[in-house]
Image (spheres, rainbow, N blue to C red):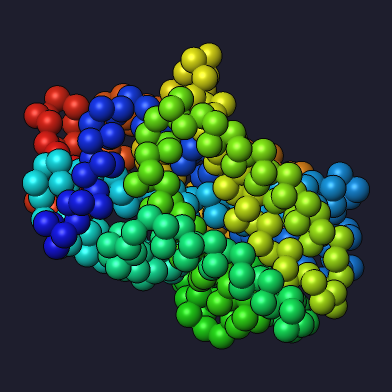
Amino acid sequence: MQDASSSSGRTAAQTVSESAGRLVTVDALRAIALLGILIINIRSISGLDFLNAETLATVQGGGDRLAATTLAVLVKGKSLSAFSFLFGFSFTLFLASCIRNQRPFLSLYLRRIFFLFCFGLINAAFFYWGDILINYAVLGLLLLVAFRLPQWLVLTLSLILLLVLPIAMAISDMPVADPGMLYEGLRSLAAYSDPSFWTTVEHNLKRFFGPSDELSVVRLWRYTDIVGLFLLGLWTGRAGLLHDVTRHHRTLLAIALVAVPAGLVLELGRALATAESTPQAAFMAGTPVLAVGYIATAALLLNLACAAPVRNFFAPAGKMALTVYLMSGLIGEIIFYGWGLDLIGEVGTMEVLGIAILVYAGLLAFCHLWLGRFRFGPWEWVWRCLTYLQWLPITKRAPEQAAPR
């Protein structure tokens, strides 16, 4: 496997070696995507989506409704899509690291995603039922096949998965909303209001592994969307677009100028469409399109010389992405669930947004302090030790040892 992977990963490995400093931009991109994910996840944990119309009206004012619509159009799904893209991109960094350090890629990668799956189980049970790590671990196996494919085919498959399925859903008049979601929401509200932590754990597992309140066709689209973004991230990593933003400035600018307006039009169309509208499913393509536009735009802006302080400000959270992701869910539960401060269903979107930003600011400050002394975040260190099956040094005083990104 290592020999077979060399032709696909050697270019990425060389580019990383020659442009290591520019990877701070990727860390900053990951951190900014995490901010959006944290905001949407904490809003979900807040219980607002579980309330019926009458109760929701008592906690949501005009500003809250405007904020909720803005988040739905500009942030919801887009940050997660950007994170999925960066997962596929990071695959090329991991492959390049294995080749550069002459490490067995296949065994390391399989252990890496197996333990990511385990972290996902912990997250789904104890921190946040809407875990994405399990899906990443399972669907990440497809990258072992995809990285052997030629670039043109990887890009073609990505575009088919991201764009064709929503259009096919629209043509076949498939619904994208489930009228039975309210009942499930009321049950979740009752469970998460319970003062017992173990009631939360039990319901987290029921929500994650039990029957979904989401239509199967929409859930299928979410999986194909993730895989499509994995492939697009893989294609981008092998093409070196984010390794040398200056060199690929025109390409990234063209992507931004096309994807951002197109994505916004599609997202606005979905926001304005009724649940019964036949073309509503087609608007779902706006999520990955806008996310790709965001990535291209952010990469260009973060690559500016004057943006160095911004890159350095956000990068620690990107380096500790697993820690930030897991701990944000736990903090959200502490704030909103019955075993914590029990604010579930009590505050509107504006207040939730403020809470989420404060949580992110606290975690970002923690990342800066932690990385001032340690080489890896706490969860990242555990992940690396398990991947390598050895005790890796964590303090900066320890001698350097190669480890995957």
Q: Is residue 153 visible?
A: yes
Give the left or right position of residue 139, taking residue 186 as reference.
left
Query: Could you say where residue 228 lies in the image, as x and y percent from the top left?
Result: 49, 63
Give the left or right position of residue 240, taking residue 298 as reference.
left
**Numbered marks: total:** 0
Q: Residue at x 52, y 83 (%)?
A: 210
User: Quick check: 300 above or below 189?
Assistant: above
Query: Could you say where residue 361 lies in the image, as x and y percent from the top left?
Result: 54, 33
User: Quick check: 347 above or below 13?
Assistant: below
Query: Could you say where residue 205 lies in the image, as x and y percent from the top left?
Result: 47, 76
Q: Residue at x 50, y 75 (%)?
A: 208
Query: Could you say where residue 250 lies in the image, as x and y percent from the top left?
Result: 54, 31
User: Quick check: 115 above or below 326?
Assistant: below
Q: Residue at x 69, y 78 (%)?
A: 169
Please tell me which residue lies in front, 247 or 110: 247
Q: Is residue 391 visible?
A: no
Q: Quadrant of residue 96?
A: top left
Give the left or right position of residue 99, taking residue 31 as reference.
left
Q: Residue at x 30, y 59 (%)?
A: 147
Give the left or right position of residue 360, taking residue 123 as reference.
right
Quarter of the figure with the C terminus: top left
Quarter of the figure with the N terminus: bottom left
